[in-house]
Amino acid sequence: MNIVVICHVCQRQHSFSDIVPFRAECDCSADLHVCLNCRFYDPYVENQCREDQADPVAVKDRRNLCEYFKPLGKDAGDDEATAAKAKLAALFGGAAPSASSVVGGSPSSAADEAKRKLEDLFRKK
């Protein structure tokens, strides 16, 4: 699996196979295995990390040994899933049905019908 990490300083993309090494650096000398490049980083939660099993890291822009690190960049699996969905849509003749589509009508007509029923329900008699 190919992993893409985007540097939090210069926004340059770096590709790695399987894992991102703890000592990985960008050409701009910024560390890449840092909290600021992780999907779990959230400045509004305790310890600024949404992964509740991770050990607290004091300096968020310096390399760390966190084993829960998941880079913000795109995974190759995302591209594979998109390609598979496109093949499936082509196989069945067009775009795959979305979750908002309604059997027997378009989503807009179903929404209009629901709105009409709601207005009828609350209309004064």
Image (cartoon, rainbow, N blue to C red):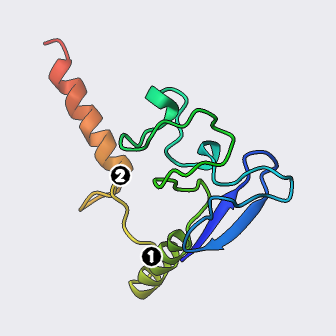
- On screen, residue 102 versus residue 89, left or right, reads left
Image position, residue 62 (x, y; %): 68, 43
| Quadrant in the picture for residue 4 | bottom right
Instruction: Quadrant for residue 61, please give it.
Output: top right
Q: Is residue 121 left or right of residue 31?
A: left
Which label is found at residue 107?
Answer: 2
Mark 2 Cα-neighbour bin, 10 Å: few <14, some 14–19, many ≥20: some
Up the image or down, 67 lies above or below 60; here it is below
Query: Which mark is nearer the camera, 1 or 2?
Result: 1
Residue toward you, 6 or 53: 53
Q: Quadrant of the C terminus?
A: top left
Where does label 1 land, which residue? Answer: 85
Instruction: Tell which circle, 1 or 2, labels the residue nearer the N-terminal end.
Output: 1
Q: Nearer the viewer, residue 60 or 100?
A: 60
Label 1 close to label 2 by CB (< 8 Å): no
Q: Secondary structure at mark 1?
A: helix
Residue lying at 65% horizontally and 72% vertically, measured from the top left: 16
Q: As shown in the figure, which amino acid type bears the numbered disc 2?
A: Pro
